[in-house]
Image (cartoon, rainbow, N blue to C red):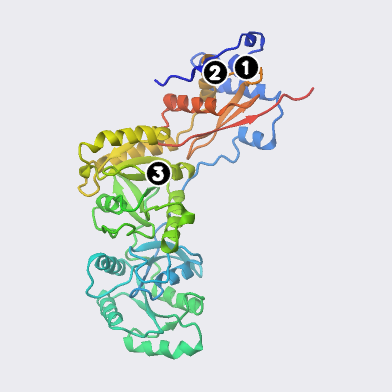
Amino acid sequence: MEQPDPTLTRVDPQDAAEPSAPLDAAAPPADDVDDEARERALRAGLEEYELEDDDLALLEGEGLDDGGVDVEAAAPVLAVVGRPNVGKSTLVNRILGRREAVVEDKPGVTRDRVSYPAEWSGRRFTVVDTGGWEVDVAGIDKRVAQQAEVAIDLADAVLFVVDATVGSTDTDEQVVRLLRRSGKPVVLVANKVDGPAVEADAAALWSLGLGEPHPISALHGRGTGDLLDAAMRALPTVSAHAVPLPDGPRRVALVGRPNVGKSSLLNKVVGSERVVVDDLAGTTRDPVDELVALGGRPWVFVDTAGIRRRVHQTTGADFYASLRTQAAIEKAEVAVVLVDASAPMTEQDIRIVQQVIDAGRALVVAYNKWDLMDEDRRPFLEREIEQQLVQVQWAPRVNVSARTGWHTDRLVPALERSLESWDTRIPTGRLNAFLGELVSAHPHPLRGGKQPRILFATQASTRPPRFVIFASGFLEAGYRRFIERRLRETFGFEGTPITISVRVREKRRR
């Protein structure tokens, strides 16, 4: 067991004349007094101190936030398809009413199929952004086109986007044949019609044989209301493809530097090529959600873009991808930070771990590419972990190979341990009994000839666990860290950050 700092156990002789702390006086060992009786006694002692309104609200249990994350139920699916750089992601953002999909003025920014919940005229639906579909392509472009084809198969209706300023191309003709084979309702979108002068170009798209082209400007919003009305007529009331999400799937964000294997791990967990994987670093741009059953329970895994550097140092698509990754972390409940075990750990790895902690999410550290690590590298890795991740020794560690699937079965138990700690609430009486014994054995060091006293403590929230300590004086950061270490030793809290805040309160003036 970890030994406390010797300064934390120092007792000044003058303390013998001091009246004992309220916590010590009212908190004999937990097996001698009922927890509820202990809590009532300590609460009564607080009445002698000046308390603010939010103190009273906290003590009465008001406003406790357990950080639940809602997951959207199933809805009809509307896929947005077309060749590269016709404005699909811009249209998706216009439908959503916010800049959600990554957009840049060059082709090939979107690569995976990405789903977003949307609403129009009181109807809920899911809009799916896709990468550009091209003919006779290879490598990453071929995999992007395959994902677009999967999106068509899983959609209830399709928005086919064509650049009206260019007109129909051979690739557009190929997409039309693909759509006809699918048998799905199709709404033809003539994009980039920024004014009346381009209306004639939009009318020329009748030649595609998909019915009336709807002229719009996704960038400026022109005509998008009429387009969505047409899309709602094409969408069925009940989806033929979307499956209602079961109750309570836990959300898992896969985060890390570019090319550490996040997409490969998701594909291995799902059991199919759900997201595009390529040796090119930074393949993923938009967060990709996937519902999967593991260990007898549902999970929503979210593949995210690799975090290259600080957000303000990125530009273009990488800048918006970094913002989406941060949002994905905040929407998740637990984050799996992937680290490349075959290469030296970097400052960026440490920063990503801290990003998850700052967001208050449960944490699992996965060392990927274990199969690529030679024996000479192993002692260096262990030393890096000891030195650079010393502040997160509480996080479960899993050594995996996303490429081969080695030890990926150990991921779910680690996630469950972290989430259980993230959800843990300690009864107030038991918490104060623990602190009473801790303070008796290791009192706070003297500050300016006085010793701050812990009056009362309560757990303000879970997800992550947050504790509030009422004290008669300031508690030093070292002593708060000592309390955190002992909390982890006594109650577990494996895989979750915990925060301890101190409220200094003075006695009422008589």
Residue denoted by label 3: 347
User: Which residue is nearer to you in this view: 62 or 215?
Assistant: 215
406 to 126, vertically: above or below: above
Q: Which residue is mark 2?
A: 439
Looking at the image, tell me whether mark 3 or mark 1 is earlier in sequence order: 1
User: Looking at the figure, which quarter contains the N terminus?
Assistant: top left
Instruction: Looking at the image, tell me whether mark 1 or mark 2 is earlier in sequence order.
Output: 1
Please report contact status of discs 1 and 2: CB closer than 8 Å, yes or no. Answer: yes
Q: Sort mark 2 into few (<14), some (14-19) or many (20+) by Cα contacts within 10 Å.
A: some
Q: Is residue 84 left or right of residue 72?
A: left
User: What is the three-letter code of the residue carrying label 1?
Assistant: Ala
Closer to the observer: label 3 or label 2?
A: 3
**Real-space Cα separation, disc 3 to disc 2, in angstroms:** 37 Å
Residue 51 percent coordinates (x, y): 69, 31
- Position of residue 185 measured from the top left corner of the image (x, y, whole percent): 34, 76
Disc 1: which residue? 21
Q: Position of residue 364 (x, y in %)?
A: 36, 40
Amino acid type of the residue tagged 2 in the rendering: Val
Q: Which of the two discs, 3 and 2, labels the residue nearer the N terminus?
A: 3
Residue 291 visible to an observer of this rendering: yes
* Direction right: furthest residue: 510
Q: Secondary structure at mark 3?
A: helix
Q: Mark 1 Cα within 10 Å, few/some/many (few <14, many 20+)?
A: many
Residue 147, image quadrant: bottom left
Q: Amino acid at mark 3?
A: Glu
Label 3: few (<14), some or many (≥20) within 10 Å?
Answer: few
